[in-house]
Image (spheres, rainbow, N blue to C red):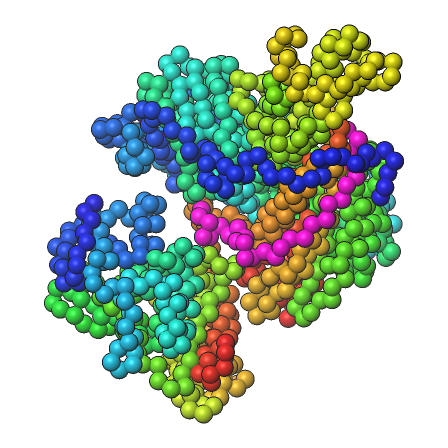
Amino acid sequence: MRYHTPTSFADASAIAAGAKGTLRFLAGGTDVLVQMRAGMVQPDDLIDLKQIPGVDRIERAPDGGWRIGVAVPGIVLGAHEALVRDWPGVVEGMNLVGSTQVQGRATLAGNLCNGSPAADSVPGMVAAGAVVTVTGPKGSRDLPVEQVPTGPGRTSLARGEVISAITLPPRGKNGGDAYLRFIPRTEMDIAVVGCAVNLRLEGDRIVEARVALGAVAPTVILSEAAAKAIIGTTLDDSALEALAKAAEGEAKPISDKRGTKEFRIEVAGVLARRAAKIAYDRAKGLKA
Amino acid sequence: MARDDVKTGYKLIGTRPNRPDGLDKVTGRARYGADFSLPGMLHAAVVRSPHAHARIVKIDASKALALDGVKAVVTRADLPTGLTGEELNLQDNTLAGEKALYDGHAVAAVAATSALLAQDAARLIEVEYEVLPHVTDVDAAMAPGAPVIREGVADYSVPEGMNGNVARYMEFGHGDVDAGFAAADIVREQTYKTEATHQGYIEPHACVAQMGEDGRGEMWVCTQGHWYIRRMCASVLGIEAAGLRVTPSEIGGGFGGKTTIFMEPLPLALSKKAGGRPVKLVMSRSEVLRATGPTASASMDVKLGMKTDGTITAGQVFFRMQGGAFPGMSPIGEALPCAFACYDIPALKHEAVEVIANRPKAAAYRAPGSPMAAFAVESLVDEMCRELKLDPIAVRLKNGAKNGSKSSYGPVYNVIGLQETLEAAKAHPNYAIPLGPNQGRGVASGFWFNHGGETSVSLAVGEDGTATVMIGTPDIGGSRASIGLMVAECLGIPYEDVRVNVVETGALGVNEPTHGSRATFASGKAAVESARQAIAEMCRRAAADWGIDAEAVEWKDGAAHPAGPNAGKHPPMTIGEIGSKMGSTGGPISGHHEVTAGGYGASFGTHVVDVEVDPETGRTTVLRYLVVQDAGTAIHPAYVEGQYQGGAAQGIGWALNEEYVYGTDGRLQNPIFLDYRIPVASDLPMIDTVIVEVPNPGHPYGVRGVGETGITPPLPAIASAIAGATGARIRSLPCSPPKVLAAIKAKG
């Protein structure tokens, strides 16, 4: 195995483009190192991104959004008060990943590129409308988060491409987001169903909404039907019921060791209702 | 509960000093199985079958052996032939013979100069399999037409016409059950299932072993019983037991799963083949879950007759239990006697079959068989209590076993504490807390026989008046502290002046493992006898010095005293004075006791649990949990409480989320702790404990043994609490959210 420590994304991309065999990028390493130890993957080239300047920084973008480096661990996100004020749902999703020790290393970019349909940080980013910047041999391009994973363990990134930053849009006024997951235990578990809701109000009325469902399909689902069910409403009971129905309708899960198909469909609706209420309260400035 | 025959007023027994192994454990200095290393040591890796059932056509290790640094490969061809019975089962499980019998079954092992190299080499060992039909479910394995996974396992007890996977049948009972059911106001019959669960010890199996060409060797190993390891390795490898010296490490949990061998013969065989170089083998978590002893899975029919006042008139059970691909490990012989052990019922009938299936060879797990039996019987008792609107504790008080009751399995109970646990549970504040919406309360009692067993202990007095105790039962739950307390109490010296060591196989006679909740009982009893011998000798030394008869000397407060005025006026002679002079007064002073310990007394417990169930997701939260159990005498109450809490925690896991999940291909789907869901700390409330003390007359200080009973009531108590919260009764464990939600919805 060749271990690389490039100091720019252009160099990282060039090394990746020239690599012939199995390739992995290393940020926090909480997936890659575990997979290596378990014998699941034996990279020929391992490219550590942490020597690249800026990868550990969270910066306010000129438009009021946030630019998050690819090596910023969950614990740093959780401690960033202004970011948490803007995007509590994104941060709480990331903070559910693993244990306290894992939080010291695990990153948004890594959670995304690992390609798990159950990744806890991804529905929140999708609902928030997050965008990743991808650096490749032909330069950089921006990509909505939901277009990165293409199936379990797979991404749309071409060989030589590497995520160089994650950008969250400006929060704007009267917005709120939330993420909930279902696990049988209280922590140290993997989502059986996940749901993130991001919305914005004018008065009591929802004017914008994005609803993302995790662990109910090969990739995270951004559900237009679920969003439509609550846009224009005050999230009254009938809106919540319509939201749950829409979420259930969008879910396309399988039965496996973590839960049955029927259970996941049912709980997708339950979590959508509950997450929407939290996001709504947050948009109203209520503590939740 | 005051009794005249109960001695109280101990100086040390009942106190809570620090455990002697505590400092090493919290600082990381304690040496566990994987912490041993030797110069020139090789590392081993194991090749395991990916198939549930397959004929092994060919094993080709040539590519592995060609790697620089690979020193030895062993397959079944390297082991002796001609073994029979359980010795053959152990050998078959150590390395597959003609067939691999479960996903994870060891097929070959390799030793190399590094662990990574050994793993690489293992991947290069080519095994050709012919995949065979498999079966993993207990009921499916018994069904007509199920593939018979090993021919000829049925013993004489199996009735004609049963599937070839049925290895054993047993039945017993008393009274006229038909008349009993006829006398009942209601008779109910249900079937209950429990899935296999793993002991989940945090320390994977690990050992370092060395064996020369002469078949003599040494081993350092994480185990509950090193004489068992010695005997089993010797028979699997065809060597003399005395040629193998086994030293136990500290142990990071066992719960019964470390009372047998799994991979331990492999490093010995590899070492011999590698010219006597020591070999280390440490299992991964996945190997532990795939290939070491889980408990049995069970399918159980129960029938009970009850009068409207709660009197139980008759009971009947038929248990089907599979304990993996080898006969002998399904705990029907324990499950049946435990089924009604808490009750005094006039008519009972017990039947059970042991079934083999394509799963790993089961091992003991904390009160083997008893939790499943309790799940079936205590669940049905609770169902009938709810139907008749009877208080579950009152019904158990009415029907519960008492002193002098004939037990459900034959013997008459001498002095037992079931009624006392029920009274204490009823009086506990938890039993009176009002329940809110979606909350429910469950009650269940449980039982374990406890055990005595082969025990050999020595004690030596030091020159400074301290005492060293040599025991052969590895300390998994604080037994060194408890035995130290008993010896210090007996000798009349400070607890800190006693050091209890777990010693190797060369230092004592044969000891059974720490199993059956026997270590504090049996090693403690033998240690007290050893101390009494040393006291007698110290009294003789004092008597000789004083020129009086030894009978005229008595021992108290750590010193020899003249027994009365007739013995003359002599100042007390302390253990320190006697020890400092013993070289010139007759030589070293020691005590030794060996016995197959009798006099063990059963421990009963009663648990009360409150849960809240999310009606929209089926997820259960344990709100509060109470364990009441009879300890006999709690030598070190903190470790007794620890056992109660640990048993409850494992039982809660078994009840809520733990299960072996097999795919249609017969492969274990969840061989990691991410998906094999033992409870994490935040899943559990602080578990409340009440120690009932009804001393066991068969032990010098009244000890019963407390390790196992506590895992028994949680399974039915949790399911009953969920029934109370939701109205939906789960009769198939675990009560996982998908199952509970489906049951809530089915109820409508």
> Residue at coordinates 46% horizontally, 62% vertically from top-left?
A192
Q: Is residue B14 visible?
A: yes
Q: Is residue B719 magenta?
A: no
Q: Magenta segment, which residues?
A: B671-698
The image shows residue B371 at horizontal and vertical percentages of: 65, 44
Q: Residue at x 85, y 33 (%)?
A: B5
Q: Residue furthest bottom?
A: A203
Residue B565's place in the image compared with B145, above or below, is: above
Instruction: Out of B733 and B31, give the one closest to the viewer.
Output: B31
Question: Which of the 4 quarters of the picture holds residue A165?
Answer: bottom left
Quick check: A126 left or right of B334? left
Of residue B211 and residue B399, the one placed in the foreground of this image is: B211
Residue B212 locus on image (x, y percent): 38, 16
B261 or B475: which is nearer to us? Answer: B475
Residue B683 shown in magenta: yes
Indicate the quadrant where residue A108 lies: bottom left
B496 to the left or right of B431 = left
B479 sits left or right of A140 in the view: right
Main secondary structure along the magenta-highlighted residues:
loop
Would you say residue B92 is visible in this rendering? Answer: no
Query: Picture coordinates of residue A59 (x, y %)?
Result: 28, 73
State the quadrant of the N terminus of chain B. Answer: top right
Residue for point 77% across, 62% down:
B432
The percent position of residue B234, horizontal first and vertical second, equals 49, 19
Viewer-proximal residue among B116 and B176: B116
Establish if B638 lies above or below A178.
above
Q: Quadrant of the C terminus of chain B?
A: bottom right
Task: Write the residue at 81% across / 13% down.
Answer: B551
